Image: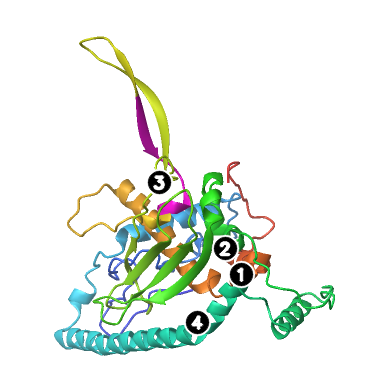
Amino acid sequence: MSSNLPIAHGDMTAPTPQNTPLNQAPIAQGLSRPTVPDISEDNEQEDDGDVTLPPGAQSAMLGLVQNRLSDLVGKSSGYIESLPIEVKKSVEGLKGVQVKQNELQNQYKRECLELEKKYLELQKPLYERRNAIISGSSAATAEETAAGIQASLKDNPDYTPLAKDPPTGPAAIPEFWLTSLCNHIGIADLITERDRGALKHLIDICLSYVSSDESKSGFKISFHFSPNEYFENELLDKTYLYQEEVGYAGDFVYDRAIGTEIKWREDKDLTKEFEIKKQRNKNTNRTRLVRKAKPTDSFFNFFSPPFPPSDDEDIEEEELEELEAKLEMDYQIGEDLKEKIIPRAIDYFTGKALEYDLMEDDDEFDELDEDDDVQFDDDV
């Protein structure tokens, strides 16, 4: 637990979370919570007697303290301004050193990005081979099948290997990508029953990187479809662009996302619901039926991503929070497609990846003591 420590300049105190300024953090990049004194320390009695708090009161008080700290973040306490001039110069000098560290971090991340591109090129023949087996244009070799069986035995010692029948011809795997997407916890929530008909025509999902000639770096997720009755496109792209400099935590920060415009066939737009309404002419009193479209939930809204607000855009706080939540979700889906689903598609098809995704979710929750008062809403 941290506390304010005196330093060598009179009675001045080192900065606290209240007076340490923070620049606006990028969306989807976490901020560390301020460290605050334990509630029990604040309530110590002179006779060192214990203070008993009602169930849940400590967490409630901690929340109030954290809210108070968040209100003070970015506001100066006057500590830095009160330092002697020679110390201020030292502080500015440290900022200059940090600038050089940031430049090296930028260089490091860009070299990592180039390494990602290199290994994607090395994996391309394997992705092409995977697509050939999924589509049924080529049969799995005996060597590939044997390696797969060994992997299954390693994961599950009780696995029953396939019988050694005579070699058979190629066999396409039906609805491979639809099944894989539905086995991802986050993406499954976006797929409606209406979407499934279109996603059955999804034949491949590919990753590529934005060309080095472009002004911004980033990556592209490409969805390949067979001809279908829903839209004319056979290729739907989603491109994620990074900001030029890495973020405070040393990672790339998303700038914006761009999706392909879907050319829907008549009456097949899955992102809209149509309803028939009556309208009455005020002059003639005649009525007519009008067909109106309204937005609805659909996986295909993924290709019409929200756009980050500009600095000079006047937007209500509640609306801004809602927009930030949508942007964060959009970026997370893109990241999971890039880092999880595309490289480990077979694990999502079989459901193996679910075990690891659920383990990651469990890690986000701290274990609670038996005496902790925990309440959940009924609709969660």
Q: Position of residue 14 (x, y in %)?
A: 32, 77
Q: Residue furthest left?
A: 85
**Which of 23 and 293 lies nearest the eye of the viewer?**
293
Would residue 99 be visible to someone looking at this image? Answer: yes
The boundaries of the magenta stretch are: 290-301
Q: Earlier in the sequence, mark 2 or mark 1?
A: 1
For disc 4, the neighbor class at 10 Å (few under 14, some 14 to 19, many from 20) is: few
Q: Position of residue 347 (x, y in %)?
A: 64, 70
The amino acid on which the numbered mark 4 sits, given as a three-letter code, is Lys
Q: Is residue 172 left or right of residue 241?
A: right
Q: Residue tagged by mark 1?
A: 134
Q: Earlier in the sequence, mark 3 or mark 4?
A: 4
Residue 339's mark?
A: none
* Residue at 50% from the left image edge and 65% from the top image edge: 38
The amino acid on which the numbered mark 1 sits, given as a three-letter code, is Ile
Q: Residue tagged by mark 3?
A: 265
What is the distance, in whole Å, between disc 1 and disc 4 at their CAs? Answer: 15 Å
Q: Nearer the viewer, mark 3 or mark 4?
A: 3
What is the distance, in whole Å, between disc 3 and disc 4 at their CAs? Answer: 33 Å
Q: Residue tagged by mark 2?
A: 177
Q: Position of residue 27 (x, y in %)?
A: 36, 64
Q: Secondary structure at mark 2?
A: helix
Q: Earlier in the sequence, mark 1 or mark 4?
A: 4
Q: Residue tagged by mark 4?
A: 124
